[in-house]
Amino acid sequence: MQVATLLSLALAVSAAQWPVSALGYDLDGDAKLNQGLPEATFHFQGQYSPRWLIPSNITPVTDAPLDCSVTQVNSIERHGARYPTSSALKKIQATLTYIQKALAKVNASDIAEPNLRFLKTVQLQLGSNDLVPYGALQAYYSGHSTAQTYPGLTGLGSFVRSTGDFEGLNDRVIVTAQYWKLGYSGQPFPSGNMSTANQTRYAPGLPDIDVIFSELAGVNNTLDVSTCTANENQSPKPEAAAQAAYGKSTLEPVIGARLSQGLAPANITLSYSDILNLMGLCSFDTLGRAAVIDGELQLPDGGNISDFCRAFTDAEWQLYGYANDVGKWAGAGYGNNYSRALGGGYLRELLARLTGVAPPLNPPTSLNTTIDGNSNLFPLDRGIYFDGTHDNNLGPIATAFGLFDGPALDASKSHAEQDPHNWYFSRIAPFQGKIVFERLQCQPGRSYVRVRANGAVQPATGAYAWCKNTAATELDQSMAQYGLCSLDSVKDTLAWVNTDSDWKNC
């Protein structure tokens, strides 16, 4: 198609205006995975939300616009749902021990608020660190949906990478990648009753993946960067400091005060960290005890959500969501001075794939030159790439690319959650959260990039748009309404990733 014809078609479609998505479609198993999970609760869990399909204001969502075609897909995804980390679990147990000790001589029926009476005797049935069956099903659906969404690319082959170590069972991202590949290949989910982490980990028939970056100290790893010394040495940690400030300004006087009244006649005063511990159990207890039976999800206790979810109001969940948003904005987003350095290594790899040119190995920054310098371990000819990572790496990658930019998040102001902001972490890196970078061909010699985050096409034009359109033509400007940015502009914008301009601050 000639440029003028394509431009005319783009402008004509613009005049007709695509409708905002009514979510009359399903991606990544969204309908099954989120059935029975109230939106007013589970969409405000920050990094502990299960992935959910974000409404897109730009259409089409999965199909390529006009007569363009997708020629490459790079899907970087957080691991699926897991148990609390071992350190977090200790803090959670300390909070419950404090509450139960204070309630020891109080009859459950005398506790002022009925929804809190379960706290007197509740016993956790959770492990630590590991991927849970729900998370495995998330990953499986993600891989399966990817193959269905891009059938024209499956013939070009896929390449699956992960981060982690089988030794010490630091393998939740690895196991996620295995289930993603299982779903992508069209194989059935393992049969039988899967209700434990070990059943998830050792299920028969899980495929090998192509590359695993070790997370051992000192190893360069673009999917889990720990070699930026200045970032590692920040004290206090930005995330913890931001949550402490918001906890003092809002969580304690609102949620803490209500819980103190609700747990009367016991004399209980909960800190912001106690509040965060209790609220985090909504997701951990619900998803961690869910089973997958012959590939079908079964929520715990006959299909119910955890009592920890019902202990808080819809309005309080919005406060909890912001506590996680502001924490990750400060620690893994635009509020962290090292986010560009942390995300730059992966973006160098992404740019290499998009352009078909091997990444420069010097300066190495977080690049693992042994892997990226080997064309068998870093191929450039595949149609679909999967990269498994953690939330604290996905946030910096999004930041370094320019996604979800907006007003700074305030931690110290009371009810700062009411201020406008674009950084909602449950929409960025929830459990199995995914950001998909697509390369499209729209005419001979003209390539574009489109970004979809958890189903929503990210705007390439307007305030805080990720596309800078540094090399824009009239056609490029018209294509931006579909979320498309010319590859030339992306190359110009990401030129810094092939340098150490940000890494030298590490």
Image (cartoon, grey):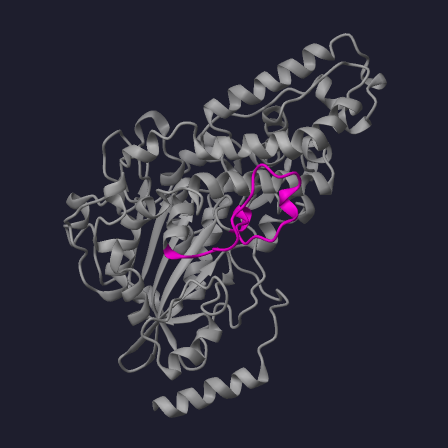
Where does the magenta region start and end?
A: 401-427
Number of marks: 0
Residue situated in front as seen by the camera: 405 or 82:
405
**Residue 466: horizontal and vertical position, in percent?**
42, 62
Residue at x 61%, y 31% (from the top left corner): 247
Q: Position of residue 477 (x, y in %)?
A: 42, 78
Q: Is residue 192 visible?
A: no
Quarter that holds the C terminus: top left
Residue 290, percent from left and from top: 59, 36
Where 449 falls versus 473 (above or below)?
Answer: above
In the image, farthest residue toward the front = 413
User: Looking at the image, which residue is at 56% across and 57% down?
Assistant: 54
Viewer-closest of 181 and 220 = 220
- Which quadrant of the rendered structure holds the N terminus? bottom left
Q: In front here: 347 or 466? A: 466
Horizontal side of residue 48 vs 309, given as left or right: left
Task: Decide which of 359, 380 is in the foreground and name it.
Answer: 359
Magenta stretch encompasses residue 266: no
Is any atom of residue 424 visible in this view? yes
Q: Give above or below for 363 relative to 467.
A: above
Q: Residue 306 is drawn in which quadrant?
A: top right
**Residue 423 colored magenta?**
yes
Q: Answer with left or right where residue 491 lies relative to residue 199.
A: left
Q: Residue furthest top?
A: 105
Q: Residue 374, image x and y in percent? A: 14, 50
Residue 444, picture quadrant: bottom left
Is 375 located above or below residue 487 in the figure? above
